[in-house]
């Protein structure tokens, strides 16, 4: 049987890789890719705690499903924003997008 | 070393390598394809955790919809930031340091938790996880409210995405 700690370390590693991508990428779409990795790490944790906790209470799986919905909403709104910004200012580089800068 | 552990280590290693390629590769289209590989790895982890429904939803929703949406968006915005220019911003060392510190902090936190090596309870053979998940998602005494809130969120995101990306003639 795989110990719970393996899943926790795996999801922590996946989360920090995603965090690194979000912090360092210049392309806005690549930043969103990093956010997807972080959401997946959270889902691994939720399902692992469902399996190692009370199996009959489906809390972990229910909230994993809700994270799926949140991820889909985030991607559709985020990519629509990226495409709209690209049409307006012809760039997807995060540091060039300073329309809101004072 | 049981076969289960060996399979877990192979899948987890492949997933982490794919995730590293997602955040470091120069070509954004390749990054999107590496994301598909990483998502498949996570789906396999769900299958190892006896969460078959979540694994299937992962493949259908993440790989079938979200990853394809990413590839569309990359293709629509590829005119600038070709693969020759820098893909990492100036502060990438600081970003790597913050990520390493986060992982170190999480690892230290795990070490101090006494339930870390708890064994997984056996699943009774009569237990149908998918049926239980469905009835809990639609039962007023369980999780119907978060479920409905999530669907309203999806509807709002869909309307917002259409409105934001809409071009006036």
Image (cartoon, coloured by chain):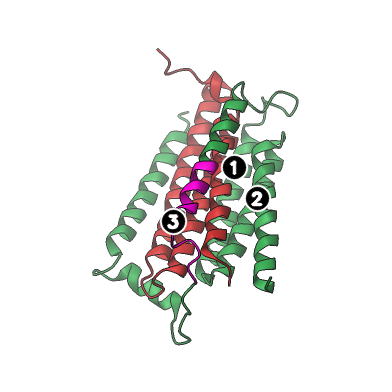
Circles 1, 2 touching at the beta carbon (< 8 Å): yes
Q: Is residue B114 left or right of residue A36?
A: left
Residue at (62% x, 27% y) in the render:
B93
Question: Residue A83: image x %, image y %?
Answer: 54, 33
Which element is circle 3 on? loop
Which residue in the protein does label 2 denote? B16
Element under label 1?
helix
The residue wearing badge 1 is A17
Q: Is residue B98 visible?
A: yes
The lab-note entry on whether marks 3 and 1 share a chain reads: no
Marks 1 and 2, how far apart in space?
Answer: 8 Å
Residue B79, placed above or below residue B12: above
Circle nearer the viewer, 3 or 2: 3
Please check the rendered image and state whether residue B109 is part of the magenta-colored stretch, yes or no. yes
Q: Colour of chain A?
A: red
N-term mark: 3 or 2: 2
Magenta region: which residues?
A: B103-119
Task: Specify the farthest residue to the top.
Answer: A102
Q: Colour of chain B?
A: green
Q: Are marks 3 and 1 in contact (CB under 8 Å)?
A: no
User: x, y (%) of residue A68?
Assistant: 46, 55
Does any portion of residue A92 appear in the rendered image? no
Taking A87 as reference, is B22 above or below it? below
Q: Residue at x 57, y 26 (%)?
A: B94
> Which is closer to the viewer, label 3 or label 1?
3
């Amino acid at each position: 049987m795989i110990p719970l700690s393996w899943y926790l370390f795996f999801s922590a590693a996946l989360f920090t890789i995603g965090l690194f991508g979000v912090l360092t990428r210049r392309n806005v779409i690549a930043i969103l890719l990093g956010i997807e990795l972080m959401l997946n790490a959270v889902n691994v944790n939720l399902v692992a705690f469902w399996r190692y906790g009370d199996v009959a209470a489906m809390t972990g799986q229910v909230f994993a499903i809700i994270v799926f919905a949140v991820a889909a909403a985030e991607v559709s709104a985020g990519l629509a924003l990226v495409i709209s910004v690209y049409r307006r200012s012809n760039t997807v580089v995060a540091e060039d997008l300073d329309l809101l800068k004072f | 070393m049981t076969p289960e552990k060996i399979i877990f280590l192979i899948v987890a290693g492949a997933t982490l390598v794919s995730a590293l390629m997602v955040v470091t590769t120069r070509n954004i289209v390749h990054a999107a394809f590496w994301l598909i590989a990483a998502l498949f790895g996570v789906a396999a982890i769900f299958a190892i955790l006896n969460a078959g429904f979540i694994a299937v939803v992962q493949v259908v929703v993440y790989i079938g919809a979200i990853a394809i949406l990413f590839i569309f968006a990359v293709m629509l915005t590829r005119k600038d930031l070709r693969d020759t220019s820098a893909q990492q911003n100036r502060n990438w060392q600081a970003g790597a340091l913050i990520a390493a510190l986060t992982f170190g902090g999480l690892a230290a936190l795990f070490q101090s938790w006494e339930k870390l090596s708890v064994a997984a309870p056996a699943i009774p053979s009569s237990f149908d996880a998918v049926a239980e998940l469905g009835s809990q998602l639609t039962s007023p005494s369980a999780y119907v409210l978060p479920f409905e809130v999530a669907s309203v969120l999806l509807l709002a995101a869909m309307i917002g995405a259409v409105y934001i990306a809409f071009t006036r003639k």
